[in-house]
Image (tube, rainbow, N blue to C red):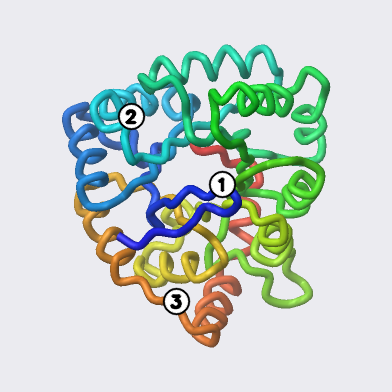
Amino acid sequence: MPTRILGRTGARVSILVMGGGSRFLAYKDEDQAQEALNKALDLGISYIDTAYSYGEGVSEKRVGLVMKTRRKGVFLTTKISQRNGDEAMRTFEGSLKRLQVDQVDLCHIHALMGKDDLERIEAGNGVLNTLLKLRDQKMARFIGVTCHNDPEVLKTALERHDFDCVQMALNAARVGMGKNIAGSFESIALPVAKAKKLGVIAMKVFAQDKLVGQAPADKLLQYSLSLPVAAAVVGMPKLEHIEANVRAAKAFKPMPRAEMEALSGRLAAANKMALDRYFAHHIDA
């Protein structure tokens, strides 16, 4: 499995991340969920992404059952949705218990939504100050923020604050193509993250499966991994999805710029406006 350095964190991670959101919760059988996580690790995935809001702790508990015996060599990330600092701390302490660890590698502020949301995050009793404390206390080695709907507000957040990492929606269909189409994370927020040497994780590679069938899955993954990112997080609700995405990651070669432009031009023209509307209110849970 190819690996990359996660920005200024210095951590080396697999370019493919096992997502613990709604796609992971699609494993209704607990034994199969454990099998999926173990298969991902066996095949070379070294980064697991989860959050309390994924099933109100169900995803974290599942990950914790694996971390109990396989913590070494795994880059473990969780996220906090609460905006109040005290509530965020209680959630994080619960996350450590569910994950059966004393420390996570990365804790994100989950799903930055807009200017008002950023103000709540930045408030004196907001979640940002809690995350800074968690990093100082080494309960989280690194801190970050995720965003899938507003590249401008993410740009502002990254410019203002001392994050280590950022997770943003980066796929071939959401690139601004033409003056009448709104900008994209790729053109607005990604350059700031790159300039600050943040660890960048691409998400929504398949746009919640809305791009499946419009382009080969391996091409969609290849596009996102050809951007200046460390890794791409993917939800894989079937064991064969894990195998297929691992094969694609292991075979990865940068997509030529002309091919990227052709793919994004075709997909953005057909999908971008609808996807922007969809992700304006979507939060994976």
- Looking at numbered disc 1 in the image, what kind of residue is underneath it? Thr
Q: Is residue 253 above or below residue 102?
A: below
- Looking at numbered disc 3 in the image, what kind of residue is underneath it? Pro
Pointer 1 or 3: first along the chain: 1
Q: Nearer the viewer, residue 63 or 220?
A: 63
- Decide: marks 1, 3 in contact (CB < 8 A)? no
Left-right relation of 260 to 212: right
Residue 28 found in image quarter: top left
Dot 3 crowding, Cα within 10 Å, few <14, some 14–19, many 20+? few
The answer for how far apart the CA atoms under marks 1 and 3 are is 23 Å
Q: Which residue is mark 3?
A: 254
Left-right relation of 161 to 89: right
Q: Which residue is mark 2?
A: 63
Left-right relation of 143 to 12: right
Q: Which residue is mark 1?
A: 9
Q: At which x and y percent is residue 133?
A: 67, 22
| Total numbered labels | 3
Q: Is residue 11 above or below residue 256?
A: above
The answer for how far apart the CA atoms under marks 1 and 2 are is 23 Å
Q: At which x and y percent is residue 45?
A: 31, 49
- Looking at numbered disc 2 in the image, what kind of residue is underneath it? Val
Q: Nearer the viewer, residue 26 or 73?
A: 73
Pointer 1 or 2: first along the chain: 1
Q: At which x and y percent is residue 88?
A: 62, 19
Dot 1 lies on which element?
helix
Dot 3 lies on which element?
loop
Dot 1 crowding, Cα within 10 Å, few <14, some 14–19, many 20+? some
Residue 253 found in image quarter: bottom left
- The residue mark sitting in front, 1 or 2, is 1
Residue under the image location 53 percent in, 72 percent down: 267
